[in-house]
Image (cartoon, grey):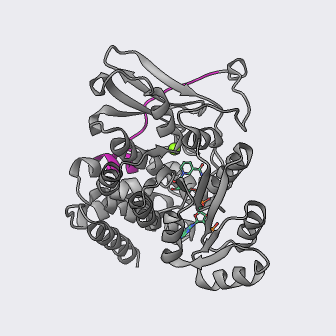
Amino acid sequence: MVNSISVLGSTGSIGTQTLDVAEKLHISVCALTAYSNIDLLEKQIRKFRPKLAVVFLEEQAQKLKERIKDTKTCVMSGMKGLISAAEIDSADIVLNALVGMVGLEPTLRAVEAKKNIALANKETLVAGGSLVMNAVTKNGVHLYPVDSEHSAVFQCLQGRPDEKSLKKIILTASGGPFFGKTKSELENVTLAQALNHPNWSMGAKITIDSATMMNKGLEIIEAYWLFGVDADQIDVVVHRESIVHSMIMYRDNSVIAQLGLPDMRIPIQYALTYPGRFESPTGELDLSQVENLSFSKPDYDTFKCMSLCKKALKIGGTAPAIVNGANETANRLFREDRIKFLQIGDLVENALENVAVTKADTLAQVLQADKSAREFVLSAVK
Ligand code: NDP
Ligand code: MG
């Protein structure tokens, strides 16, 4: 088990649940970061007494500095601050719970500083998968998945005899709030309806990604990089109850699944205690109370973001970064009530068709693809 952790994005859904796990396991916290929520960050600082606190927005960082003058915590801001939190000496693991591409550089810098990573920030792997995985190998560190599906796969893979034995990965998808709806029924859905996820309480961006099922598309790409399988070896099955968190099939057709209540503290804790198992902060799963476990095929046509991610993975290079950047922008525009729900998929599709794909070997190439995709979406909605 780790002794000390740096939590990037500590004020978010995953960040706060990570601190809950850390507190129960008596893991010390050496760095915390937020974008602007200094009220919550101040409470976290007073409780966990980290060496470093980062507020991305400079103005809010100055306010926080004033407020916590009586503590020993040093305050920084911007990307420089995030990188300092990622590289901080005292951390033996960095849990990245930032949302979006802003997490890519801190992940890379943490890996280069020989830190193990617990990764929730899936956009990092989607856009910069080859960069991140090459850096992980080169620096001899471990990258532990926090995303529930990938934690499930990782758990199922424990004890596998050899690389060749894995036949496929079967990711489960809740289907989100709009499962079973037709395109015409999705035409005028509202933000409030899209934010109403049936099983999980999460940050706004990923909740919208779950409604479009872009989230599952991103997770296909995430699985590709984490587990070194071909795109064709990753299947998705809709499982409305979110009890089976994902499965693997071995070549003898034996299927192994990981089950549990839908509570992110289980995968977060496993990433921090691997390979150990400790008492859980969450409730026990009582299968006799779960009436039904259902499984069905996803609707790749209505929820085309999933297909677009598969397509981007096959194209390779910066195509996944383009899909991710376009989605981050379209997702935000929908949350700002500037586009309709179905436009998210249309914009991602148009970006993938129109933005030039290059190699994705350097950070500059990935960041440029991301920027071009964002610009494409913004100019398309003008
Ligand atoms: P939240 O929106 O709840 O939290 C995001 C965190 O990052 C907050 O601390 C926020 O600060 C900070 N942040 C946001 N934008 C920036 C920025 N531009 N620069 C610096 N800091 C920023 O997100 P979630 O916790 O839901 O998700 C985090 C990541 O984990 C995402 O990649 C998501 O896909 C993934 N994930 C989440 C799951 C969940 O259950 N929530 C499940 C599986 C994966 P502030 O509070 O000040 O805004
Ligand atoms: Mg997930």
The answer to whether 151 appears left or right of 203 in the picture is left
* Image quadrant in which the C terminus is located: bottom left
- Toward the front, the furthest residue is 89
**Image coords of residue 307 (percent x, y):** 34, 46
**Image coords of residue 219 (percent x, y):** 43, 45
Residue at image point 46% right, 67% down: 102
Numbered range of the magenta stretch: 292-310
Total numbered circles:
0
Question: Is 216 situated above or below 249?
Answer: below
**Image coords of residue 276 (percent x, y):** 58, 32
**Image coords of residue 343 (percent x, y):** 43, 62
Question: In this view of the protein, which residue sits in the foreground, 183 or 105?
Answer: 105
Residue at image point 46% right, 34% down: 154
Q: Magenta includes 300?
A: yes
* Image quadrant in which the N terminus is located: top right
Magenta span: chief secondary structure: loop
Question: In this view of the protein, which residue sits in the foreground, 281 or 175?
Answer: 281
Asked if residue 237 can be seen in this view, the reply is no
Residue 283's image quarter? Answer: top right
Question: Is 226 situated above or below 256?
Answer: below
The answer to whether 263 appears left or right of 137 in the picture is right
Question: Is 305 situated above or below 171?
Answer: below
Asked if residue 112 can be seen in this view, the reply is yes
Residue at image point 54% right, 40% down: 148
Question: In this view of the protein, which residue sits in the foreground, 256 or 174?
Answer: 256
Q: Magenta includes 241?
A: no
Residue at image point 45% right, 57% down: 342
